[in-house]
Image: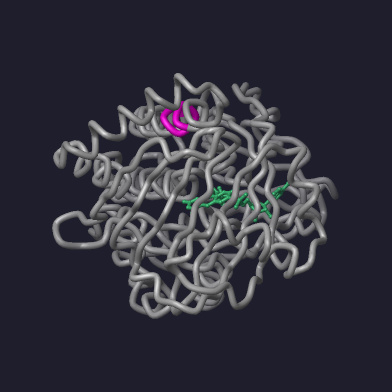
Amino acid sequence: MNKKTINASDIIVKGDGIVSLLFALSLQSGLGDSFSILIITNKEFSTFNDKKNVRTISISLSTVNMLRALGIWESLVDHTQCINEIIVSSVNRDNINSGYLNFNSNVSGEAASYTIEEHILRDKLLSIIGAKRNIRFINTEVDSILHKKNTIQIITDEGSLFETKLFVASDGRKSKMRSLFEIKDVGWDYNQASLSAVIEHSKKHNGIATEIFYSNGPFAILPMRGNRSSMIWTMPKDEIHAYRNTNELFLKDKIKDHFGYDRGEILHISNIGIFELYFQISRKLIGKRFALMGDAAHTVHPLAGQGLNIGLRDAATLAEKIVDAVRYGFDFGSSSIVEEYEKDRRFDIVSSALAYDSINKFFTNKDRNLHQFGKIGLGVIEKMPWVKNMFVREASGLNSSGARLTRGEAL
Ligand SMILES: Cc1cc2nc3c(=O)[nH]c(=O)nc-3n(C[C@H](O)[C@H](O)[C@H](O)COP(=O)(O)OP(=O)(O)OC[C@H]3O[C@@H](n4cnc5c(N)ncnc54)[C@H](O)[C@@H]3O)c2cc1C
């Protein structure tokens, strides 16, 4: 392509993660085929078809509602497993159980969360997008940007020129677009890593999710379709090396004690992945004709399985602002529209990220007194059903978003 040729799209999205894909489909659902969407991918950084695409993710009711409103849920439901009950406990450094909580994971008679394999969700979204004429992909890297009167121009590494009213980046934690728009972030390395795997077991799981807070990191087991469970085992980064390139037998032995015998024998372990953990929040979600979404804007500890759900609430909110602006004839890339997006999303993002960070810090320590305090805390909450209901509603994502899609309403 020649630099002088301007390729115009109504909106340009950088990154082809689940947040970007559902954002594009949300816009499509509200504005139809005449609204053109260009998704910029970069094969060099692709997180798909490699070891990172092995995870099973827990999706909250806000995400399920969004998938329902977009007409996608029906084709996925047979691949999902609802979480009926959540058992949380903590174990101190002497291996003594120091607290227990049991939640009925229900909101108004419906499961507050489900699990699904990430590759199934992504493949489904890609196949739906493949049939949409107005959503295109291009593999390139953004080199620089140029603001024009009512548009923003994007110049790629090879010198091609793209123009749009709004540029959105959801290209993951390492997003280069933050620095291009001079957006600073706050963050730190947890010095922890999670080992994720799918475990096939001999007994039924009955839709029960278990999370045990050990003094060196949380260990979570989520029920999956069939007699399978997803394990997320978080430990100090320097301990995870023993599990890299390991064999199934070694893993079985290591996992047995933590796993819990109520699910019977471990028959098979697959989809093993290792993920280093970071905390990161952007100081701003927006720039001139620019918005950040998903992990590019906030990366949170996975102990509550909420990172993607929060990112999808960004996508649902921004899509709603854009669709409404287009319908009323406003400039959807203008400062007032992106500022509304930032205002609506700030609290949910910061409060969720800090809450998971505090829980991790509270339980991941060797201090016996803190564990004793945690035991009392969990014991008190266990006796307060209304507090437990509040936690479940919070985890469902319904408290944190006013976006229509997350309530199951069409745009
Ligand atoms: C161990 C673990 C377990 C988790 N479990 C859950 C869970 O149960 N539930 C939940 O809600 N969340 C969970 N999360 C968090 C969740 O995985 C992320 O929040 C989510 O994947 C973020 O989606 P995203 O689309 O914003 O970013 P990503 O998934 O990181 O996607 C970013 C995309 O951008 C692309 N990209 C990167 N660089 C460029 C570039 N330069 N140009 C163009 N494209 C680029 C990548 O290829 C990728 O497609 C978990 C995280 C971890 C680490």
> Could you tell whether 211 is left or right of 12 in the image?
left
Q: Give residue 96's position: percent from left, percent from top.
A: 47, 38
> Could you tell whether 203 is left or right of 249 in the image?
left
Q: Is residue 371 above or below residue 211?
A: above
Q: Is residue 282 above or below residue 267?
A: above
Q: Residue at x 47, y 65 (%)?
A: 261
* Magenta-colored stretch includes residue 358: yes
Q: Is residue 336 above or below residue 238?
A: above
Q: Give residue 243's position: percent from left, percent from top.
A: 76, 54
Q: How many marks?
A: 0
Quarter of the figure that contains the C terminus: bottom left
Camera sees residue 229: yes
Q: For this rendering, which residue is in front, 157 or 149? A: 157
Camera sees residue 290: no
Predominant SS of the magenta segment: helix
Q: Is residue 162 above or below residue 222?
A: above
Q: Residue at x 36, y 56 (%)?
A: 63
Q: Residue at x 47, y 26 (%)?
A: 362
Image quadrant assignment for residue 330: top left
Q: Give residue 345's position: percent from left, percent from top.
A: 38, 34
Q: Residue at x 44, y 79 (%)?
A: 226
Q: For this rendering, which residue is in front, 75 or 205? A: 205
Image quadrant assignment for residue 148: top right
Please give the range of residues in magenta: 354-359
Q: For this rendering, which residue is in front, 318 or 117? A: 117
* Magenta-colored stretch includes residue 21: no
Q: Give residue 170's position: percent from left, percent from top.
A: 58, 46
> Could you tell whether 95 is left or right of 54 in the image?
left
Image quadrant assignment for residue 126: bottom right
